[in-house]
Image (cartoon, rainbow, N blue to C red):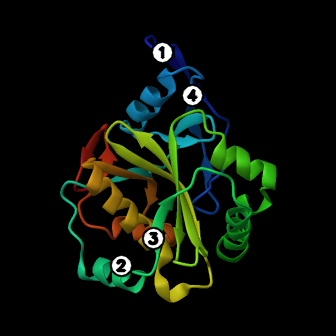
Amino acid sequence: MGTLKKNELILKSSTEFPCSYIKGRLEKRIFVNIPKNKSGNEVISKLTQKGFRRNYDHMYIPSCKNCISCISLRLNISKFIYSKSNKRNLKTNSDLSLVENKFYSEKRFKLFKQYCRVRHSNGQMKYMTQSDFINFFHKSKNKVKIFDLINLNKELYGSILLDVLDDGYSAVYSFFDPYSNKRGLGKNLILKTIQKLKEKKKRHLYLGYWVRESKNMNYKSSFNNVEYFVNGEWTEKL
């Protein structure tokens, strides 16, 4: 489809396959493999800023016929203000801390499987083996951060995998205890990540694609100071 001469990246097109977000639709992607050399981190940063998203060892962007529902979304951390709802969530989960842990954990894998079974029973992630999970979470070619949400007794409530970018983090995947419904753990993982970015004075947290038709993605647009990637530019309005 084209090349980026500086990094010798070749853009390729996938065949159509069932849409991951909207039932009954077909999805098609433009993708590029991430280089194995040191330029990989730079490539991921630049492509994420252009609306791409990482999946394993490649970056992709939707290129679907007659559909533009997938919109890249990020939070402007420098402008982010905690709403009353955000503050309630942080207070409810004040007994939990977001702690970096790059090493594989059996507890993490078991929680992931439980989360997939309860919250995403129709998704493909539930079929991941232990080996698949290790490759996905712990063998990225690029620089990543892995944080666990734990209490004082080191009981695990959730985890989040983040790509480290020039201007912040990109949330690759997160999961949490599916039975702690009143805690709002998915939201808490994002809020505590925002806190870390504020401490580092980084500007953005990328949350991947937002699809208006998908109820599971409503939480992404519920934050304030959201920016959408539309027509090649980041904008606060759709």
Q: Earlier in the sequence, mark 1 or mark 3?
A: 1
Q: Earlier in the sequence, mark 2 or mark 3?
A: 2
**Residue in view at x 72 percent, y 49 percent:** 134
Residue holding disc 1: 7
Position of residue 49 measured from the top left corner of the image (x, y, whole percent)? 36, 38
**Residue in view at x 42 percent, y 27 percent:** 42
Question: What is the three-letter code of the residue carrying label 2?
Answer: Leu
What mark, if any, has residue 90 been given in the picture?
A: 2
Answer with left or right where residue 1 lies relative to residue 222.
right
Question: What is the three-letter code of the residue carrying label 4?
Answer: Ile
Labels 2 and 3 touching (C-beta < 8 A): no
Q: Earlier in the sequence, mark 2 or mark 1?
A: 1
Does 221 appear above or below 201?
A: below
Neighbours of disc 4 within 10 Å: few (<14), some (14-19), many (20+): many
Q: Earlier in the sequence, mark 4 or mark 2?
A: 4
Q: Earlier in the sequence, mark 4 or mark 1?
A: 1
Image quarter of the N terminus: top right
**Residue in view at x 62 percent, y 84 percent:** 179
Residue holding disc 4: 34
Answer with left or right where residue 114 lies relative to residue 153.
right
Labels 4 and 1 touching (C-beta < 8 A): no
Question: What is the three-letter code of the residue carrying label 1?
Answer: Asn
Question: What is the three-letter code of the residue carrying label 3?
Answer: Ser
Q: Nearer the viewer, mark 1 or mark 3?
A: 3
Give how far apart the Cα atoms at labels 2 and 1 are. 42 Å
Position of residue 25 measured from the top left corner of the image (x, y, whole percent)? 61, 55
